[in-house]
């Protein structure tokens, strides 16, 4: 086990100036040894210091922080005693988590009626529009029935409709640059298996969308995490990670990032595009939530900012799951036409084509997407307001920032009790996942909950009341809490 940690430490070093900068923001100038140790723990659990990263030498960090070496030595001792650091002669000191804090195991789907599900950040279907789309699909089906029905690229009409929407959003797109998939998760997994090779590095945000992280691990790829907070991305850290780690791909959610809700500024997008071009990194951009813009216009497609010649390195995935309904498994990839052909060939052995009837339903919905959003976005704003008001009433000690879009809040509980709180509140009929489920490094973000505002105001009030009730119980973490890992969306 120790040798494995040494390998991680060699791959992931933390510079003394970088750590000093992070710690100054967390604990202030010239901290004592206990404050210094607590600052490292806080940054580690929040994902801002990656797990299995070599910490700076004591003398280097002392110089960067302008404290005595004895202060740093004592802080490292506290970290080791608490299980947050390990040391080995000749290999240095690297970050770790205490035993029993590493989530593992298989996903478990929700079961039982009457459970308020806060683990799924997705709305119900727009019933009237879905009914109209089904009726329209029934009429159009007659044109497709005489054919074999296999369309590995997707039916031409839907490819054209998705391409036209990209064009209207500011990214000129041809139908042959679109591949229709069975949801965005299928699009993501397909892209990873085509472009990634066993052991390749993939830059990921920390925290990030759990199913994407699982797909990256499942493809045998190595995640290189960069922190994202409610304040957004550290563009300099993203750039240095791209240059130093030389990842094969970078998976980013720049639009109302899941789970933090952050929106990446235009200038950061341009810098990342330029750096990725220089390093030869493929950018895999997840725009599944891009249309859920609640406090301003929706952002232009990330790839629309690519300098000449760099657009071919950007692959965009999206779906109807967040704008319409997760039960309609329709997604897409937007990329260069040659890559689209390679993706279509890659999909055939495991998934020959997306069902035609669902594509016809999606065709009607994509063409009328703006109408659906005009009705949905004001309702989501009201539900977001209802959630923040309910949290302020029942758990005023919790902290959050209101995101400009997306479907959830990233709530700071103030202490690492998320997994045990999720277990306690499940007994009261609320299903929610602790923040560690979203961590690129298992066990981090235990002081966080992602709370969606996709339920009605009444149901949200009930759920928050139950969370507050569960909060009053004994929430000491247990090994059983740590190993539970559920399905989220």
Image (spheres, rainbow, N blue to C red):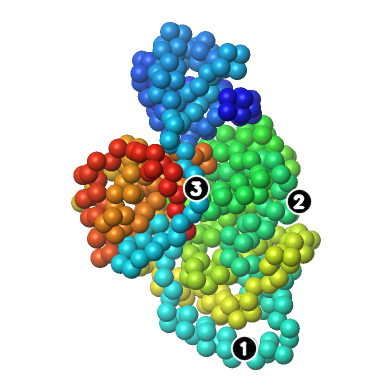
**396 relative to 443 in the view: left or right:** left
The N terminus appears in which quarter of the rendering? top right
Q: Are marks 3 and 1 in contact (CB under 8 Å)?
A: no
Measured Cα–Cα span from mark 3 to mark 1: 44 Å
SS state under label 1: helix
Q: Nearer the viewer, mark 2 or mark 1?
A: 1
- Tag 1 or tag 3, which sits nearer the N-term? 3
Q: Nearer the viewer, mark 3 or mark 2?
A: 3
- Position of residue 123 relative to residue 73, above or below, is below
Mark 2 highlights which residue?
309
Tell me if residue 109 can be seen: yes
Mark 1 highlights which residue?
140
**Residue 179: percent from left, percent from top:** 69, 67
SS state under label 2: loop
User: Looking at the rendered structure, which numbered label has been put on residue 463?
Assistant: none
Measured Cα–Cα span from mark 2 to mark 1: 39 Å
Q: Quadrant of residue 351?
A: bottom right
**Residue 7: percent from left, percent from top:** 64, 27
- Position of residue 446 relative to residue 106, above or below, is above
In percent of the image, x 53 and y 77: which residue is there? 365
Label 2 crowding class (10 Å Cα cut-off): few <14, some 14-19, many 20+? few
- Tag 2 or tag 3, which sits nearer the N-term? 3
SS state under label 3: loop
In percent of the image, x 72 and y 77: which residue is there? 150
In percent of the image, x 56 and y 80: which residue is there? 361
Mark 3 highlights which residue?
105
**Residue 10: percent from left, percent from top:** 64, 25
Tell me if residue 314 can be seen: no
Q: Quadrant of residue 171?
A: bottom right
**Residue 421: percent from left, percent from top:** 31, 46
Label 1 crowding class (10 Å Cα cut-off): few <14, some 14-19, many 20+? some
- Position of residue 467 relative to residue 185, above or below, is above
């Amino acid at each position: 086990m120790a040798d494995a940690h040494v390998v991680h430490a060699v791959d992931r070093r933390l510079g003394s100036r970088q750590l000093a900068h992070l710690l100054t923001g967390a604990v202030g100038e010239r901290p004592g040894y206990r404050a210094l140790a607590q600052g490292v723990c806080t940054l580690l659990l929040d994902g801002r210091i990656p797990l299995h990263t070599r910490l700076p030498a004591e003398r280097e960090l002392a110089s960067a922080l302008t404290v005595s070496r004895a202060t740093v030595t004592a802080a490292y001792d506290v970290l080791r005693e608490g299980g947050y650091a390990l040391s080995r002669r000749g290999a240095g000191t690297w970050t770790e988590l205490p035993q029993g804090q590493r989530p593992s195991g298989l996903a478990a789907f929700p079961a039982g009626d009457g459970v308020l599900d806060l683990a799924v950040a997705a709305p119900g279907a727009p019933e009237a529009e879905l009914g109209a789309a089904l009726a329209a699909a029934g009429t159009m089906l007659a044109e497709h029935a005489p054919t074999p029905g296999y369309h590995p690229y997707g039916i031409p009409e839907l490819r054209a409709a998705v391409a036209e929407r990209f064009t209207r959003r500011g990214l000129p797109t041809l139908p042959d640059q679109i591949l229709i998939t069975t949801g965005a998760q299928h699009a993501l997994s397909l892209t990873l298996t085509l472009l990634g090779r066993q052991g390749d590095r993939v830059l990921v945000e920390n925290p990030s969308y759990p199913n994407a992280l699982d797909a990256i691990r499942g493809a045998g790829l190595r995640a290189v995490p960069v922190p994202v907070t409610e304040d957004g991305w550290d563009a300099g850290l993203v750039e240095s990670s791209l240059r130093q780690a030389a990842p094969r791909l970078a998976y980013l959610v720049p639009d109302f990032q899941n789970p933090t809700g952050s929106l990446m500024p235009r200038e950061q997008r341009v810098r990342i595009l330029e750096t990725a071009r220089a390093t030869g990194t493929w950018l895999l951009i997840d725009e599944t939530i891009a249309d859920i813009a609640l406090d301003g216009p929706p952002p232009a497609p990330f790839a629309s900012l690519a300098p000449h010649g760099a657009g071919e390195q950007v692959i965009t995935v999206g779906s109807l799951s967040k704008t319409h309904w997760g039960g309609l498994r329709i997604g897409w990839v937007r990329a260069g036409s040659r890559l689209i052909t390679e993706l279509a060939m890659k999909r055939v052995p495991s998934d020959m084509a997306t069902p035609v009837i669902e594509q016809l339903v999606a065709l009607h919905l994509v063409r009328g997407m703006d109408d659906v959003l005009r009705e949905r976005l004001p309702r989501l704003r009201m539900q977001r307001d209802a959630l923040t008001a309910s949290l302020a009433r029942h758990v005023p000690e919790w902290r959050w920032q209101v995101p400009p879009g997306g479907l959830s809040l990233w709530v700071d509980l103030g202490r690492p009790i998320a997994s045990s709180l999720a277990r306690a509140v499940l007994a009261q009929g609320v299903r929610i996942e602790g923040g560690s489920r979203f961590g690129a490094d298992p066990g981090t973000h235990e002081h966080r909950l992602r709370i969606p505002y996709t339920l009605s105001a009444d149901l949200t009030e009930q759920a928050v009341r139950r969370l507050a009730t569960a909060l009053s119980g004994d929430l000491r973490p247990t090994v059983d809490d740590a190993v539970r890992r559920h399905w989220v969306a």
